[in-house]
Amino acid sequence: MDIQLKRGLLDVCVLAAIKDADSYGYRIIKDLKPYVELSESTLYTILKRLELAGMLTVRSAEHGGRLRKYYHITRAGLGRIEDFKDEWREVMTIYQFVAREDTGHAQTGIS
């Protein structure tokens, strides 16, 4: 998969993971696991990028005697999710065209 496309998809996945409630790194990885494999180092790079872009905020709170960073989605982050949904509709339309073409070639024997 194209690295830029994957990067954008992962950013939106992380935003979606914290859309309904603030969360922290380990929880985000656990929530995403059924859908996408994400290492801690990749996640924290994404979280920092999203914070710098104003799509999430970070607060620290004590949990079990340690400080834990909690991530909260901003209005800009919610907007990015909505933009993604709109963009994905266009991608799916293009995919349907490409897949239709592949099916047509398979039926006609053209390679």
Image (spheres, grey):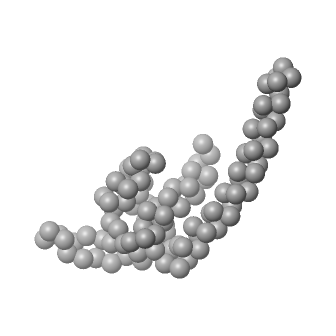
Observer able to see residue 53: no
Give the left or right position of residue 35, taking residue 88 as reference.
left
Q: Which of 23 and 1 is in front in this view?
A: 23
- Residue drawn at the location 38% of the way across and 56% of the way down: 31
Observer able to see residue 27: yes
- Residue 52: x %, y % from top left: 49, 73
- Residue drawn at the location 32% of the way across and 66% of the way down: 24
- Residue 110: x %, y % from top left: 85, 22
Q: Nearer the viewer, residue 4 or 33?
A: 33
Picture quadrant where residue 47 is located:
bottom left
Q: In the rendered view, would you say 85 is above or below 51? A: above
Give the left or right position of residue 103, taking residue 77 as reference.
right
**The N terminus appears in which quarter of the rendering?**
top right
Q: Nearer the viewer, residue 43 or 75?
A: 75
- Residue 70: x %, y % from top left: 33, 72
**The C terminus appears in which quarter of the rendering?**
top right
Q: Looking at the image, which residue sits at the far top?
A: 109
Q: Looking at the image, which residue sits at the far left?
A: 65
